[in-house]
Structures are given as C-alpha cells and as structure tokens.
Amino acid sequence: MADSTANLIIGEDGLARPAWAAGDPLLREYYDTEWGMPVTDESGVFERLSLEAFQSGLSWRLIFARREAFRELFAGFDPQAVAMFNEDDVERLVADARIIRNRSKIEATVANARATLELRATGSLSDLVWSYRPARTPAPRSAAEVPSSSPESVALAKELKRHGFRFVGPTTIFALMEAIGIVDTHLVGSHRRGASELWNPDGTQRLKPAAAGA
C-alpha cells in the first residue's frame, strides 16, 4: 500500500500538511484552523468570495497579510454596508496601500454586495452557493490531483454571473468551494482531511452543514 503521507510534509508537531501550508506560519494557521471548515452565513461567504477575487493572480500570503485591513475598509464585509459604497468610497479604497489597490476588483466587490442583497428576495448568497455541493468530493493524494474546477463550480459561476456577480470564474468559485467546506480537497493523509465533518475520507457525504439551508 502506498504511503499516504508521501506528498505531505510532516511538521515539528508531527502533523502532515501540504507544502503550501507547511512553511509560512500565517498560512499554516489558516490551514489548521479555517481552510475547508464550513462557512454558511451570508457575510462569511461574501467575505471569502471577495478575498478569492482579490487573490486572483496573486499569492494567498499577500492577501492574508492584509486581511484585517480588508475587513476594516470593507465594513467587516457586511453586504448591506458595502452595497452603499459610492465612487468616493472606491477612490478612497484605490488610494489605500493597506489592501490590493485594484480598481476593477474593488468595484466588483461593491457590485457583488449589491447582487448579494438582491438574492435575499429568493434566499441568500449562502443558500445559492451551498446548493451546488456535489454528491462526492475529490480524494487527492498529491497536489497534482487537486482539480482547479468542477462541473459544479462551472455551473455556479454561470449562475452567479447571471445574478450580476463579477470575478466569479469557475476556478475562483472552486477555490471558494474548497475554502468554505463545500468540497474537501485536503490531501489524503493530511491531519485536516475530513476535519469539516461533512465528508468521509473516501469522498462520500457524511453530514449536511447545519445552517446552509440544506
């Protein structure tokens, strides 16, 4: 039988992690405590969606080093508050070196907040996103086996665009699904595999998230 930890790094604490989470303390903390854990509240999903958009083309280290500044400047990622941002607010954010000063991504975050509010007429952003949870999750044994998209992320990206969301391509949406527990792409053998308690190690569903309307 192949060693399930062959593609993982064993830390000084004896725990197995993928290379991206094994070195930098900030990323290791994120991996050990947050990545892949269920996020089912509207503002939480909106925050992760926003950060995924800002991360596109950049490193996660860069984003997480600025996370508290993002939260401060985007009103704690409260969709109601961000939806009220106007052109002066956009200019203020573009000028603030504490975050990623990308005008298109900033404007997309405001537009996505407004789209999030519009979804309340029929449910919520969280309900929509979690409705695309697949019947099975991948069970990768190496980084090369981790997919960058899925049929569900393609379909969800299309649906979000239909509702007016921006920066929501299939790859970005799959990364969101990984981050908030909709899929579990922790490598087999990682100490975090199955940590969300939503998936069995073999990739079959175990539980449904408590507050996702599922």
Image (tube, grey):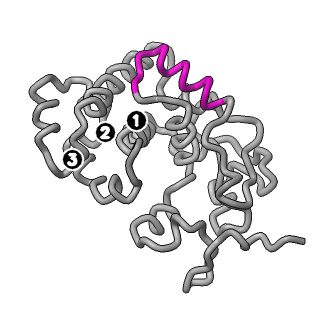
Assess disc 1: are there few (<14), some (14-19) or many (≥20) residues with their C-alpha within 10 Å of its C-alpha.
many
Query: Quick one: label 3, few (<14), some, or many (20+) residues within 10 Å?
Result: few
Question: Which residue was labeled with disc 1?
Answer: 46
- Marks 1/2 in contact by CB < 8 Å: the verdict is yes
What type is the residue that disc 1 sits on? Phe
State whether residue 137 is above or below residue 3.
above
Looking at the image, residue 88 sits to the left or right of residue 38; the answer is left
Label 1 and label 2: CA atoms lie apart by 7 Å
| Quadrant housing the C terminus | top right
Which one is earlier in the sequence, the residue at label 1 or at label 2? 1
- Is 17 left, or right, of 47 in this rendering? right
Per the image, label 2 sits on a secondary structure element best described as helix
> Does the rendering let one see residue 80?
no
Q: Nearer the viewer, residue 91 or 77?
A: 91
Q: Residue at the spot x=31%, y=39% of the render? A: 77
- Residue type at the position of mark 2: Phe
> Mark 2 — residue?
77
Q: What's the magenta region? A: 152-166
Pointers 2 and 3 in contact (CB under 8 A)? no
Examine the image and state in which quarter residue 113 appears: top left
* Magenta stretch prevailing secondary structure: helix
Tell me the residue at 62%/23% (across/down): 155
Viewer-nearest residue: 8 or 34: 8
According to the picture, the residue beneath numbered tag 3 turns out to be 72
Rounded to the nearest whole Å, what is the CA distance between mark 1 and mark 3?
15 Å
Q: Position of residue 201 (x, y in %)?
A: 77, 57
202, 40: nearer the viewer: 202
Q: Quadrant of residue 205?
A: top right
